[in-house]
Image (spheres, rainbow, N blue to C red):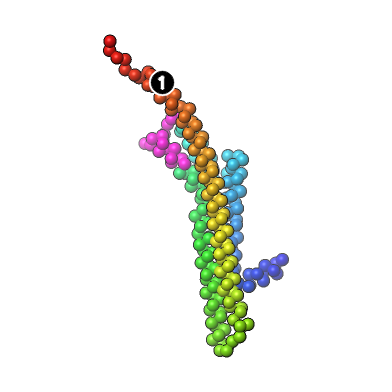
Amino acid sequence: MLNNFIAFIDAGGPVMYPLTGVGILIFVLGIYQIVWLTMWTLKSDLYSCAGAPMWAKKAIALARHQTGFAGLTILESIELCFSRMEDCLTRRVPAMRFLAQISTLMGFLGTVTGMVRVFNTVAKLGAVTPADLAGGIHEALFTTVYGLILAIIAWGLTYCIEALSRRHLRHLELLVINELEKTTPVDGIKTGAADAPQSEK
């Protein structure tokens, strides 16, 4: 197993080693975040970013008590809670996008190093056969395919993270709207009845 893995890495040349490290980071970060987002669906208090459930509870409490943070209206305070919660839910997304771009660039770097190997072979041998060039061309194409596959996986995991995050945010929006509807209409009717000026007879 280990020998097969080493042979796989050697097939793409030296660029394959850092590129494989990037691939491991992509899988670890992406799957880690997706697993925790899924677990948070089952139990809202269990989440790797402690700020997410905290900001969710604050948004619901603000809607329930009809109060905002100091210097902010209720809606501004709730939007602030949503923004902070979204930051917690999607905090791995920038890293995933960066790794996707890096894997693509490193794949193209492998292409360049493979072509350098091809031209170096031509320069040394002068008259070459296709077999002499095959190693460099194989290295160039192999790293390109490997880098692009890792980039596609990274973008796919990023989409899953963002989709699960939007699901949690939509669920929180519904909870906040329900709390606002419980208080605002009723209070509005009562206020209107109590504060309505009596017409002079």
x, y (%) of residue 15?
57, 70
122 above or below 137? below
x, y (%) of residue 149?
58, 63
35 above or below 186? below
Q: From this viewpoint, which residue is outermost toward the right?
A: 1
Q: From this viewpoint, which residue is outermost toward the top?
A: 201
- From where the camera sits, is residue 16 visible? yes
Residue under pointer 1: 190
For the N terminus, give its image quadrant. bottom right
Residue at the spot 61% in from the left edge and 40% down from the top edge:
42
Q: Is residue 80 magenta?
A: yes
Q: From this viewpoint, which residue is outermost toward the left?
A: 200
For the C terminus, give its image quadrant. top left
Residue at the spot 46% in from the left edge and 33% down from the top edge:
62
Residue at the spot 54% in from the left edge and 57% down from the top edge:
155
Residue at the spot 56% in from the left edge and 58% down from the top edge:
154
**What residue range appears in magenta?**
65-82
Element type where label 1 sits in the image: helix
x, y (%) of residue 83?
45, 44
x, y (%) of residue 9?
63, 70
Q: Is residue 58 magenta?
A: no
**At label 1, which amino acid type do we have?**
Lys
- From where the camera sits, is residue 61 visible? no
Q: Is residue 184 left or right of residue 117?
A: left
